Image: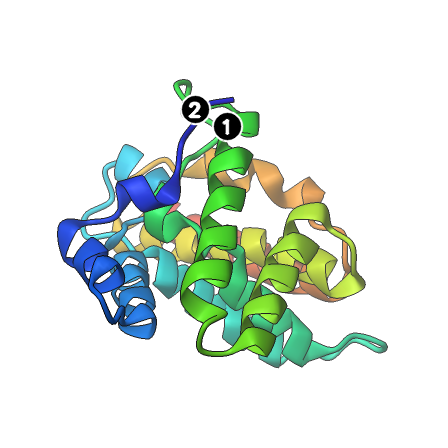
Amino acid sequence: MSNWKPQEHLPKEIKDLIERPTPNYTLALFDILHKLKLQRRTGWINNGIENPESISDHMYRMSIMSWILNSDGIDSSRCMKISLAHDMAEAIVGDITPFDVKIDKVEKHHRELATIEYLSEMLIKPYNEVAAADILKAWHEYEDQTSIEAKYVKDLDKFEMLVQCFEYERMYKGKKDLSQFYGCIDEITTDEVSKWTQDLMNERKEYFKSVSD
Ligand code: ZN
């Protein structure tokens, strides 16, 4: 594991907000979150998708998906919060995919944990201690899969990507091979998200039938 520290990877203008005599931590946080709007998801870039979605695009749609979940015994507001927190650390760490050989799983986890702890402890806590603890808890809940809500969000993480993938397949009129992204379907375990996935796959099948005619 490296000695990687999030505070050493902040742009100068954000460092200036934090290191001045009267720091503006909340503005620093909001500026860091801007990176989630700018960061394009690596999986699409690697496949030559033009102008692909950002990390916050992905989390936004997952949050709405979470909101409308309708399974017994789950707290959809909790799912929304977990959705909003789960990729937050990528604002500083960046989007590392399993195909990234330079940074292994342990190092990825180390950097993301260091980042979410930094954001929570240093930037959010001085303003709102309750929210700081809740964001950190939601991130851990997802990372460690310790609640039923976290399991739904893990399914939505994959399902949202599949919805996006089918959108790109149609954008390229079925001529770009993105089939590798569908390898994760078997890992979707909850009934509700499995049903959504099945419906999506049926649509996709019909679509490819129509373009091959
Ligand atoms: Zn995600």
Residue in the picture at 17% in, 58% down: 16
Instruction: Give amino acid for label 2.
Output: Ile
- Residue at image mark 2: 103
Q: Is residue 57 above or below residue 115?
A: below
In the visual, does 169 lie left or right of 205? left
Name above or below for residue 49 compared with residue 134: above
Would you identify the image quadrant in which residue 13 lies? bottom left
In the image shown, does 4 or 166 lie closer to the viewer?
A: 4
| Place of residue 64 in the rendered image (x, y in percent of width and height, measured from the top left) | 52, 76
Looking at the image, the residue that sits furthest to the front is: 21
User: In the current view of this chain or complex, which residue is farthest to the left?
Assistant: 13
User: Does ligand 1 reach within 8 Å of label 1's beta carbon?
Assistant: no
Q: How crowded is mark 1: few (under 14 residues within 10 Å), some or many (20 or more)?
A: some
Front of the two marks 1 and 2: 1
Q: Are marks 1 and 2 in contact (CB under 8 Å)?
A: yes
159 to the left or right of 174? right
Q: What element carries label 1?
A: helix
- The picture quadrant where one finds residue 186 is top right
Tell me the amino acid under the disc marked 1. Answer: Glu
Instruction: Give coordinates of residue 213: x percent, y percent.
Output: 37, 48
Furthest residue toward top: 101
Q: Residue at x 40, y 49 (%)?
A: 90
Residue highlighted by disc 1: 107
